[in-house]
Amino acid sequence: MKSLQILILEDNIDDAQTIINLLSKQYAVTLVNTLKKAKAIFVTSKFDLAIVDINVDGKLNGIEFAKHIQNAAKPIPFLFLTSMQSKTVFEQAKLTQPFTYLLKPFNHLELQYTIELAVEKFFQQENTLRTNKTLISDYYILVKKQHLICKINFDDIEYVEVEENYCTLHVSNNKYVVKKSLSKIKEILGKENFEQTHRKFLINFNKVKSINLSENTIYLNSGFQIAISERYKKHLTSRFNIIK
């Protein structure tokens, strides 16, 4: 599971350290302190959200960077976190369509909730699916676990365990429960790497270490064992050309 990737444009050392201390335990945080660095890293790296100060290097460079994000081929949600209370500046900033405009000083919960809402709002688009506490894109799923938004790449999922209308995604040593049926999970994850082996299990074949057909068992790289039912055994052998 990979954390949300958050880009922070902030040139005040104290404010930057405060933000990092608040967010680094939950998210992957990248800090830059100039407009030039922000533009450069935005092109070379993938981020899920940006937190932007407006007054950078004594100029309204935060607004300039917001325009850069807005005009990018793949824009991301962003919010302003600033001490500037000028109505004129606010009107300029508003034109870039930020998620919100937070004033310093701020508290942890305010920032945390704002990040959560910004990500959820951004992903409510036609090319994504949002149900209950889950947001789904082409190659990852965002799952809310308590007050944390967890970004789970499909490739990182080892296997899915099904119980009625709930599915548990097993990722390394972590578990994430989503209210999804097996049919919906199969549709989301696709058929290229994921295969059903049992009425209760869906596995990622990239995580398979070995298959023992005589024992009707699949051994995963983690050491976990997944059952193969007779119903799915023939399909598995034909699809993956398993040599008996």
Image (cartoon, rainbow, N blue to C red):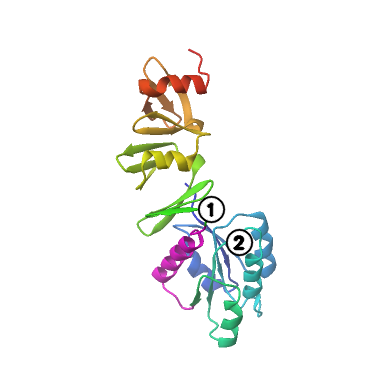
Q: Which residues are magenta?
A: 103-125
Name the mark on residue 127. Answer: 1
Q: Residues within 10 Å of mark 1 (few under 14, many from 20)?
A: few
Query: Hey, which residue is sitting farthest front in the picture?
Result: 126
Evaluate whether residue 173 shows in this view: no
Q: Judging from the image, what secondary structure is the residue with disc 1 in?
A: loop
Name the mark on residue 75. Answer: 2
Q: Which x, y percent locates residue 38?
A: 65, 65
Q: Residue at x 50, y 64 (%)?
A: 20
Name the mark on residue 195. Answer: none
Evaluate whether residue 109 shows in this view: yes
Magenta stretch holds residue 113: yes
User: What residue type is disc 1 on?
Assistant: Asn
Q: Is residue 56 left or right of residue 142?
A: right
The CA distance from mark 2 to mark 1 is 14 Å
With respect to residue 10, does 227 lie above or below?
A: above
Q: Residue at x 43, y 56 (%)?
A: 149
Can you tell which quarter of the image residue 232 is in? top left
